[in-house]
Amino acid sequence: MSKAYTRQLTSRNKRLFPECEWGLFKDITQDSFIHWRSAQKQVAPKTLNEYLNAISALLNWCIKTGRLQNSLLLDVHKVETRGKQQKRRAFTDDELLRLVTAAPQAQAALLNCSLYRIAAKRTKATGRSGSLP
């Protein structure tokens, strides 16, 4: 497990515990998680599923190490994500300029890197993002 992934799991669980009012493992209930999840109106369905994955990973670790007998959220299902993804769009020239300007130490490298220039031109020409051939 990478350090970045572990940090992300930890961050999500640190948010869940106080917002779901979980002080101890015995406080974790399906109802409290579902109530918290349904109150998250500005969070994308995929992200909500990642919060479920984070707490499930912690609970599964607790089961494997003998700290819990079973997963307290076993019957909580993921939310549907199909058809709910945000449409992606290409950066405008102004957005790309602001992005490069915001990172002065990488500005010269980014502007001189032909891969990024090609990707930016291709995205602008086709109106969509994608991988390079």
Image: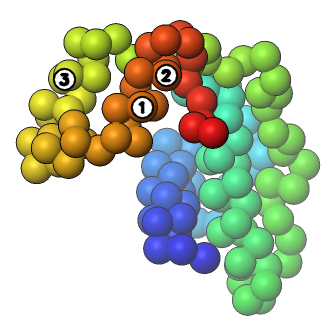
Mark toward the start of the polypeptide (1 vs 3): 3
**Viewer-proximal residue, 95 or 82?**
95
Q: Is residue 12 left or right of residue 100?
A: right
Mark 1: secondary structure? helix
Tag 3 residue: 98
What is the number of the mark on residue 122? 2
Tag 1 residue: 118
Q: Is residue 24 above or below residue 114?
A: below
Between the C-alphas of marks 1 and 2, the distance is: 6 Å
Q: Is residue 103 left or right of residue 70?
A: left
Furthest residue in direction right, as rendered: 75
Q: Position of residue 115 (x, y in %)?
A: 40, 42
Quadrant hosting residue 48:
top right
Q: Counting other residues with Cα less than 10 Å from the Cα at mark 3, is it few (<14), some (14-19), or many (20 or more)?
A: few
Q: Who's the residue at 85% across and 78% down the image?
A: 69
Between the C-alphas of marks 1 and 3, the distance is: 18 Å
Mark 3: secondary structure? helix
Q: Who's the residue at 76% across and 39% down the image?
A: 31
Q: Counting other residues with Cα less than 10 Å from the Cα at mark 2, is it few (<14), some (14-19), or many (20 or more)?
A: some
Screen quadrant of the C terminus: top right
